């Protein structure tokens, strides 16, 4: 007589257990995705916000700094020891402001044989002609100094706007300021700016001016043929100098650098 097959009862898997298992896999997958996205974002942000703190390029040999009252009065002999060729110093802003450290930095920088230039921080909404007059009255210009520069950038005093009339007004008064300096020196002033302000105000309007471009992440584009100075860091560190300073490269050789000097 054949034995009767006894079937073992199947274990019942409750819906709750299945759901917990499925949710566990989802959580693991979600965790992996979040970690990957976090790492990706970290490296993107690090690359975007990171900037050089020292001169580490073998491509550029003419190096410079720029300072204002935000920096202490520098030990300019120590600056010279770091093979710094030139320095731009903030002299004025708007129609009344004078940089308190300018007279001291100017005299000390020149005595150390660093090529010295003066710049004016352009204030939107004020008369360009009056700003030029203020700059010419307060800043110092001697033979062999660098061509005067105009700083064009957004700030709390210079809000960003794409409004057509606003942009037109900024350009109109900037042209007035630029023209006053051109009439005084017979050469077009250098214009310091960044990519945003270049596109809004400078491009197509100041073709004869040398451009001093601030870009903390990339070398200025080759399409911008008239750039000569590249500010690549706001966190420069120089031995013997307290605090951070802005670091710059001149684009070409020292012999060509002389194009930036007043006759």
Image: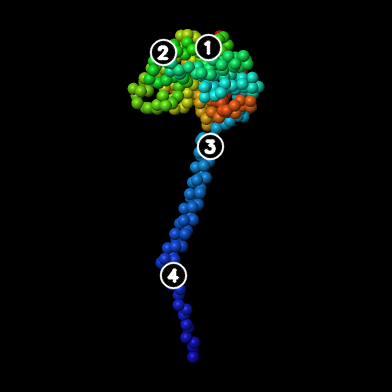
Tell me where residue 253 sits by quadrant: top right
Q: Pointers 1 and 2 in contact (CB under 8 A)?
A: no
Numbered disc in front, either 2 or 4: 2
In three-dimensional space, the C-alpha distance between marks 3 and 2, rounded to whole angstroms, equals 41 Å
Mark 2 or mark 4: name the one nearer the start of the chain: 4
* Mark 3 neighbour class, 10 Å CA radius: few under 14, some 14 to 19, many 20 or more: few
The residue at which mark 4 appears reads as: 13
For image coordinates 57% across by 28% down, the residue present is 243
Mark 3 lies on a secondary structure that is helix
* Mark 2 neighbour class, 10 Å CA radius: few under 14, some 14 to 19, many 20 or more: some
Mark 4 or mark 3: name the one nearer the start of the chain: 4
Identify the mark at residue 47; answer none if there is no mark.
Answer: 3
Q: Nearer the viewer, residue 98 or 44?
A: 98
For image coordinates 51% across by 18% down, the residue present is 100
In three-dimensional space, the C-alpha distance between marks 1 and 3, rounded to whole angstroms, equals 39 Å
Tell me where residue 256 sits by quadrant: top right
Identify the mark at residue 149; answer none if there is no mark.
Answer: none
Residue 53's spot in the image, x, y percent? 58, 30
For image coordinates 55% across by 32% down, the residue present is 51
Q: Residue furthest bottom?
A: 1
Mark 4 lies on a secondary structure that is loop
The residue at which mark 1 appears reads as: 140
Identify the mark at residue 130; answer none if there is no mark.
Answer: 2
Residue 130 in view, yes or no: yes
Numbered disc in front, either 1 or 3: 1
Residue 83 in view, yes or no: no
Q: Pointers 4 and 3 in contact (CB under 8 A)?
A: no
For image coordinates 37% across by 23% down, the residue present is 167
């Amino acid at each position: 007589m054949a034995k009767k097959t006894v079937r073992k009862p199947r274990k019942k898997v409750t819906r709750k257990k299945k759901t917990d298992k499925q949710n566990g896999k989802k959580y693991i997958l979600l965790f992996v995705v979040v970690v990957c996205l976090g790492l990706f974002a970290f490296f993107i942000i690090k690359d975007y916000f990171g900037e050089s703190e020292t001169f580490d390029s073998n491509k550029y040999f003419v190096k410079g700094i720029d300072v204002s009252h935000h920096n202490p009065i520098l030990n300019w002999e120590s600056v010279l020891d770091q093979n710094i060729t030139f320095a731009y110093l903030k002299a004025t802003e708007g129609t009344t402001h004078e940089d308190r450290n300018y007279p001291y930095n100017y005299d000390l920088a020149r005595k150390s044989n660093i090529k010295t230039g003066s710049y004016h921080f352009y204030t939107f909404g004020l008369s360009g002609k009056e700003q030029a007059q203020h700059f010419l009255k307060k800043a110092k210009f001697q033979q062999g100094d660098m061509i005067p520069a105009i700083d064009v950038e957004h700030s709390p005093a210079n809000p960003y706007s794409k409004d057509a009339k606003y942009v037109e007004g900024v350009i109109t008064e900037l042209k007035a300021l630029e023209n006053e300096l051109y009439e005084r020196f017979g050469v077009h002033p250098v214009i310091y700016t960044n990519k945003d302000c270049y596109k809004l105000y400078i491009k197509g309007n100041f073709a004869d001016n040398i451009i001093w471009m601030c870009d903390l992440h990339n070398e200025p584009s080759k399409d911008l043929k008239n750039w000569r100075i590249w500010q690549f860091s706001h966190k420069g560190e120089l031995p013997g100098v307290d605090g951070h300073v802005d670091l710059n490269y001149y684009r070409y050789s020292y012999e060509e650098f002389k194009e930036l000097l007043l006759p």
